[in-house]
Image (cartoon, coloured by chain):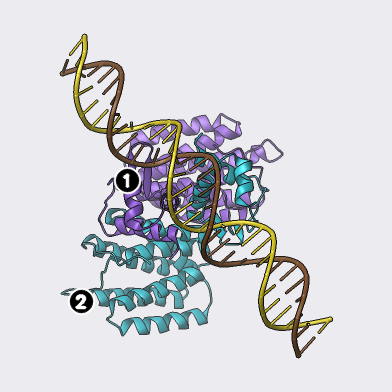
Chain colours: A cyan, B purple, C brown, D yellow
Amino acid sequence: MAATDKALAGLRQMIASGELGPGAKFPPEPELCDHLGVSRSSLREAVRSLGALGVIESRHGSGTYVSALDPAAIIGRFSLSVELIPLEGVLELLEVRRVLEAHATAAAAARQDPELEAKLSAVLDQLESTTDATEIQHLDAEFHGLICAAGGNPTVTALTGVIRGRGGHYRIFEPGADFDAIKQTSDRGHRAILAAITTRDPAAAATAASAHIAQTELWLRALRPVPQPALP
Amino acid sequence: MAATDKALAGLRQMIASGELGPGAKFPPEPELCDHLGVSRSSLREAVRSLGALGVIESRHGSGTYVSALDPAAIIGRFSLSVELIPLEGVLELLEVRRVLEAHATAAAAARQDPELEAKLSAVLDQLESTTDATEIQHLDAEFHGLICAAGGNPTVTALTGVIRGRGGHYRIFEPGADFDAIKQTSDRGHRAILAAITTRDPAAAATAASAHIAQTELWLRALRPVPQPALP
DNA sequence: GACCAGAAGTGGTCTGAGGACTTACGCTTC
DNA sequence: GAAGCGTAAGTCCTCAGACCACTTCTGGTC
């Protein structure tokens, strides 16, 4: 077995076996090298691999630790790769978002939370009064994010958030011939979702959310991608 | 900015900007080091990070390439991290699987595919006639996997597959007091799903799949995890 | 044209060294 | 006695150079 793979398997085994739980600290690199029988280079490459997946975390000067192994955090790491997926793949992902977000929106509607409803209404007021593409994207993410969070499953919130972030790279809301029509349709969709939540109608909420996202899918199909912004 | 992070950002930028598309080959490591201004160690750690995420792929003796950037393949990489998530997190993930698989099962029921139905029936015949835990797990995965694939969205198939694989580490089907009752309930659930598909009733299929997975969630809640098998 | 051997190209691994950051300890000071 | 501070130890981060292993291309041979 290759050295890096051996190190990778060894590190995973230490976690999988329960030897190291969430938050636990690994031995220092030289000791791990000795234990696993690989050089520091190979060990470090293995550590980076698991770090990219959100499984372990290195802190400069302190040590290497097992992460919290929280599903939402691990799914959040996916944004690094999802952001590089081309348009055709994004459409497959949007179907996932549509299904999950319809579910979460229904769950949010089943709750009785006037505070949430007030906050959502305020976000929509802002959203309807702006025409700036970046601000629209930000407020849209906040609206859907609040609803998903109210749905009660952080994993669903993280997953839909990652997909929404990817879709946002394609600018639907750019000044052009269809801008007004698209914006109005989008605004109406948001109001329909909020209305279903306010009236505590889960089925209507699921339908409204599903229709809203399906509309986004249609718009995206007709779009060509814009150049990526510089990565941080 | 730290060296490895700089290399990471540079590599991602090369893909995000469109300079390198799916399948494209990166320059040799020494050239990349020069271009990005980092040492070979740092570059290699960055390459490993993106490799773990399924974004790029190194082939010994050949070169480093951009992967196909296929969403299903990228999601498949998640199994490396999902397999380490503790039980509480798995329950959150199972809700995702329940929702997505209900959707996919409905889509499969909407299709007219006698060949699929025959294959599913054969799998269930095998499944009902065995009591071996490993074989049960394997046949169960094949049954649900075939249905998801028929649903038509490879991303959904990959995502549900990853979650199903994680759940399989907890052995529900172990010889014990409740074994017969659990097995019979599970078998009945599978037959209900197949019946809905055979009669081409998407709504019934979604309900049956949802109920079946919800049942699994209930069993898992009552379980304590078993020691992990050795990782490959 | 098919096959084979060698050479060139490329990623994989190891070693050794020094730098940068965090943490803990012991001292000083009030 | 408690707070502040500087030093020292511990740990990860980066670099450089060398050699190994695998793949691919090239040229010649049959």
Q: Could you tell me how many numbered marks the image carries?
A: 2
Q: Which residue is mark 2?
A: A175
Kindly report the distance in space between the C-alpha atoms of the residues bearing marks 1 and 2.
43 Å
Q: Nearer the viewer, residue B59 or B52?
A: B59
Q: Is residue A130 above or below residue B131?
A: below
Q: Nearer the viewer, residue D21 or A200?
A: D21
Q: Specify the quadrant that holds the C terminus of chain A.
A: bottom left
Binning the other alpha carbons within 10 Å of mark 2 as few (below 14), some (14 to 19) or many (20 upward) gives: few
| Badge 1: chain ID | B
Q: Which mark is residue B106?
A: none
**Residue B164, visible in the rendered structure:** yes
Q: Position of residue A26 (x, y in %)?
A: 63, 52
Q: Amino acid at mark 2?
A: Pro
Q: Residue at x 43, y 59 (%)?
A: B3
Q: Residue at x 53, y 76 (%)?
A: A112
Q: Position of residue A54 (x, y in %)?
A: 51, 56
- Are both tags, 1 and 2, on one chain? no
Q: Position of residue B20 (x, y in %)?
A: 27, 52
> SS at mark 2?
loop
- Choose mark 1 or mark 2, whichever is in front: 1
> SS at mark 1?
loop
Q: Which residue is mark 1?
A: B28
Q: Is residue A111 above or below residue B119?
A: below
Q: Residue at x 56, y 58 (%)?
A: A58
Binning the other alpha carbons within 10 Å of mark 1 as few (below 14), some (14 to 19) or many (20 upward) gives: few
Q: Residue at x 44, y 57 (%)?
A: B4
Looking at the image, residue B173 sits to the left or right of residue B195; the answer is: right
**Residue B109, visible in the rendered structure:** no
Q: Position of residue B19 (x, y in %)?
A: 25, 55
| Badge 2: chain ID | A
Q: Amino acid at mark 1?
A: Pro
